[in-house]
Image: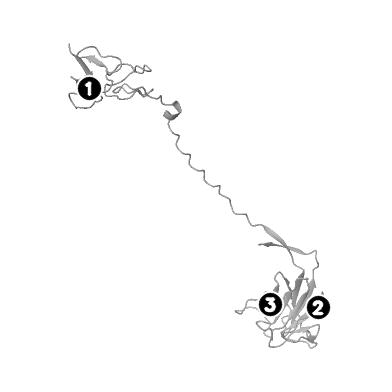
Amino acid sequence: MSAKVTCPQNHESETADFCSVCGVEIVGAAATTQGAAATTSTVGGTNCPDCGTPRESDRQVFCEVCRYNFQTRAAGVPVPKSAAAPTPAPTAPSAAPVVAPPTQSPVRVAARWKLEVCVDANLYGTPNGDAPVNQPTQSFTLFNAESMIGRAGTEVRVQVPIHGDAGVSRRQTLLVWRPDNSLVLRDPGSANGTQVNGVEVVAGVDTPLKNGDVIAVGAWTRITVIDAGDDYWADLEI
């Protein structure tokens, strides 16, 4: 039986230098006998001659373990186990924690000044028969830096509304709470003017107030200033 050699393309060649089938050069190819039993290096289903790993098919070019080339019979470099290990999937970044907004809580605010508003039929020394003397006394705490005293029920927003006294202007007088905790009165130019302790104040001029002072506005409205002191506090929703 004539000797046959196998080319790198796995053809059985009649010649040992170039493949008689495809013409590729055969370098260092070992001769095999046609029809003979396949050797461990060229026939599928045999073992790799370098590491002994089974070759699953005669079309398999490289050994899966040591990378031996079954066609050129060249030894290969073993594949490290670490390289063969599957690459772990990237871990998704954790979502940022959700921070709940701070809950609002009552804040204690110093409220030093208070006002008591009542009807006084003898406010200006002469009895006024039209004064609604049965109207209850009202109490107001001054929380704002500026508090406007004015007639209630108008389009002007006031912090101290006066009810039932037509002589009170919509913007009767302004109380200003200063940083040093003092309180002053400023009449912006009301129609009937404003008195403090029986004295008419000058419009646009600040008049200092103290505990017990009486503000007279309108026809019968008497406003008493009360200094609650540094110990008076109030709960506010801020």
Q: Residue 191's x, y, as percent?
A: 68, 88
Quadrant that contains the C terminus: bottom right
- Compared to 235, does 125 lie above or below? below
Q: Mark 2 or mark 3, which is nearer the start of the sequence?
A: 3
- Which residue is most to the front? 17
Q: Residue 149's x, y, as percent?
A: 69, 78
- Compared to 101, does 31 lie above or below? above
Quadrant that contains the N terminus: top left
**Distance Cα–Cα, label 2 vs label 1:** 128 Å
Element carrying mark 1:
loop
Task: Say few, some or many: other residues with alpha carbon within 10 Å of mark 2 (under 14 / 14 to 19 / 20 or more).
Answer: some
Quarter of the rendering containing residue 51: top left
Q: Mark 1 or mark 2, which is nearer the start of the sequence?
A: 1
Under mark 3, the amino acid is Met
Under mark 2, the amino acid is Asp
Q: Is residue 236 left or right of residue 210?
A: left
**Distance Cα–Cα, label 3 vs label 2:** 17 Å
Quarter of the rendering containing residue 211: bottom right
Q: Mark 3 or mark 1, which is nearer the start of the sequence?
A: 1
- Compared to 91, does 140 lie above or below? below
Cβ atoms under marks 2 and 1 closer than 8 Å: no
Q: Which residue is mark 1?
A: 17
Q: Which mark is residue 213?
A: 2
143 and 122: which is toward the camera: 143
Q: How many marks?
A: 3
Q: Which residue is mark 3?
A: 148
